[in-house]
Amino acid sequence: MGGYFGAVAKSDVVMDVFFGTDYHSHLGTKSGGLTLWDREKGFNREIHSITNTPFRTKFEKEIIDIVGTSGIGCINDTDPQPLLVRSHLGLYAIMVTGIINNAEALATNYLKSHEGQFMALSSGKINQTELAAAIINEQDSIVNGIKHLRDVIDGSLTLMILTDRGEIIAARDKYGRIPVHIGRKEDGYCVAFESFAYKKLGYSDARELGPGEIVKLTPDEIIELEPPGKEMRICAFLWSYYGYSNSCYEGVNVEVMRYRNGELMARNEEHNRTMPEVDYVAGVPDSGIAHAIGYAAESGIPYARPLIKYTPTWPRSFMPENQNVRNQVARMKQIPVDELIRGKNLLFIDDSIVRGTQLRETVDFLYESGAKEVHVRSACPPVMFACKYLNFSRNNSVMGLMARKTIQEIEGDEGSSHLTEYADGSTERGQCLCRTISKRLGFDSLGFQSLDGLLEAIGLPREQICTYCWTGKE
């Protein structure tokens, strides 16, 4: 994934951009970057790897010597950015969040009709931010370039541009798959993925951009360059997993949604008489905790924290590329509370089950710590498709997904014709999926939240929410 923050004001905004960007550290662990603009000194850009070091640590010494009345910053899991671009549209800095699935085809077509080159990353792939800028520059204005970019890409992009006049152009993805919040204070404006980031910096809510909307921010005003579209497909995983607890998207708070989601899960289990007899309900830290609180409140089963995450020496920013090392890091973070585990029957709620590798490590750890039974519930339906719009998964193969891999083992290729049944826990195939995954990962039982239940917990109209990873439907 990726997070972003930008600010423009009549006074210096360096600290706002620094801390505002840092508040998006939960959305990326690979690269961080800042670009500031000052009327006298022009652009100043810094990009660093944050694979093993938090964003704040990498940048806190450098910002002392930087000045600027406007700036943008980003944290992401993809390409180094923001990039500085010089073209017939002027000199500007650009950052993007999202994914271009047809990047290679677009780059090949571009090079056929233009004299030039793209700088390749170490993997040989093209930096998609550079590609986005090249496509924008084919048009006669930045706004027309952004609209052209949206028309030719397969995927989605939300972007920010910092111009050589110190203005910020913010453009939400065509279907609004991730949010763009605008905040205001006395002498300027800011733009952010997470609204809590600017509230901690003294800004108040101005408004959210609509799907496809493009605006220009100056210290004095918000100027609409392209009105919002009528269709929205905001990502449901914002609430279930990667959104921060005190964030709101389209007016729906993440923490409140998770409480409601847990309540609905418990209510459904009570109705279907599938709720196991357990001593405690717990959440897999951190994003499973609020779902578990809601489940416990509705069911009347005590809530507890049998595992405590140790973050002082294992911050989230330490997320190695190697899966075995990541599993070991995940294991090192979890510190057991022996009195809440040994001899106990536990029900753990995770935000989702994608690959299942770290969840298996967690459950094994609970048994090794003396748990009698471990039951698992997923706050999402089974993930059946790799996301094609947002880059928040390291594995884009459907066979890397626990549900799809299990279905293939159960029924071979025929299973892909019955994904809707497998996703429904009330069907024979759905129950078979749960039993098979439970056996594979060592659970005493497994259950998934239904898609209807998840959408009810979010509370927005169904047609406004992207559920592609569960249904495969656009």
Image (spheres, helix red, strand yellow):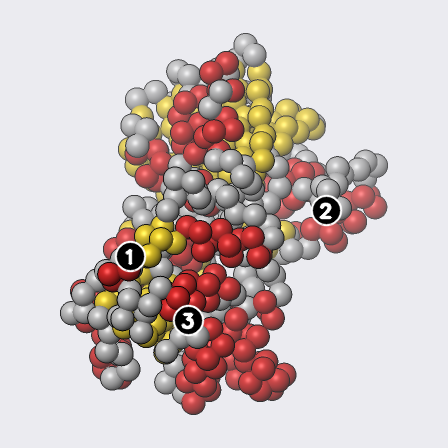
Mark 3 or mark 2, which has the lower sequence index? 2
Location of residue 154 (image quadrant): bottom right
Q: Amino acid at mark 2?
A: Ser
The residue labelled by disc 1 is 337
Residue for badge 3: 381
Residues at marks 3 and 2 touching, judged by CB atoms closer than 8 Å:
no
Mark 2 or mark 1: which is in front? Answer: 1
Q: Secondary structure at mark 1?
A: loop
Instruction: Indicate the amino acid at tag 1.
Output: Val
Residue 287 in the image, given as x and y percentages of width and height? 36, 55
Which residue: 63% across, 51% down? 100
In this view, the residue in front, 239 or 362, is 362
| Above or below, comparing residue 447 to residue 248 in the picture | below
Image mark for residue 123: 2
Where residue 269 appears, x then y in whole percent? 26, 78
Q: Amino acid at mark 3?
A: Pro
Q: Secondary structure at mark 2?
A: loop
Q: Residue furthest left?
A: 300
Secondary structure, mark 3, is loop
